[in-house]
Image (cartoon, helix red, strand yellow):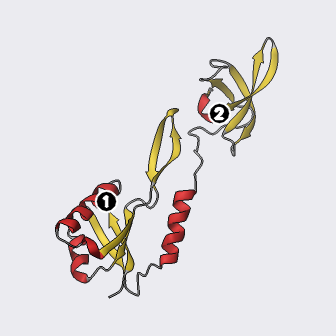
Amino acid sequence: MGKDWYSIQVWAGKEEEIKDKLLALLEERGLSSKVEQVFLPPPKEIELVFSPERHEKRRFYSGYFLLYGEIDEDLKTFIKSLEGVLDVTGGDKLYFYRTEEVERLKGNLVVEEIKPKPRYQFMAGDRVKIIEGPFANFIGTVEEVKPDKGKVRVLVSIFGRETPVDIDFTNLQKIS
């Protein structure tokens, strides 16, 4: 039996804990030589929540991690019996994972950075209050939204003149 990639489906949010528990049990039973690699997709900060200080971390392919090794039916059954493991797939013709696909997936997840998504959506003409930075507590009107940069151009009144100021999404609060 050759080495293959296997997908281990686990309880979402418990991937790291179950992976560590599995590796410890394999080591304890002298089976760690059967597993050559373990790949757990890394968590990334992908959504801003309320303020720049609080980020929400979400895991790519939540509820899964990948194993590379020589896993026979007995080992598959042992892995499935662990608390938190829902299923083990791979190694057969129906659920075959090629190494090139897994390597490409690993490369994409490690290299790719996902830009934060703002909690608020702003449009030209919206009235906003600047909540942080040098213009804190100024009230202005949205002139232009730059979603690729995560900024909004706001017209604020400084010394009686409308002045355009570029402000991060996170430093603005929509007012009605």
Q: Relative to the observer, which residue lies in front, 78 or 163?
A: 78
Q: Disc 2 versus disc 1: distance between alpha carbons?
A: 36 Å
Q: Is residue 132 above or below residue 107?
A: above
- Total marks shown come to 2
Between 152 and 104, which is closer to the camera in this rendering?
A: 104
Q: Which residue is mark 2?
A: 168
Q: Amino acid at mark 1?
A: Trp
Mark 2, Cα crowd under 10 Å, few <14 / some 14-19 / many 20+, is some
The quadrant in which residue 96 appears is bottom left
Amino acid type, mark 2: Asp
Label 1 residue SS:
loop
Query: Badge 1 local density, few (<14 within 10 Å), some, or many (20+)?
Result: some
**Image position, residue 19 (x, y; %):** 30, 61
Q: Residue at x 41, y 81 (%)?
A: 95
The quarter of the image holding the C terminus is top right
Give coordinates of residue 72: x percent, y percent.
27, 82
Q: Residue at x 40, y 61 (%)?
A: 40
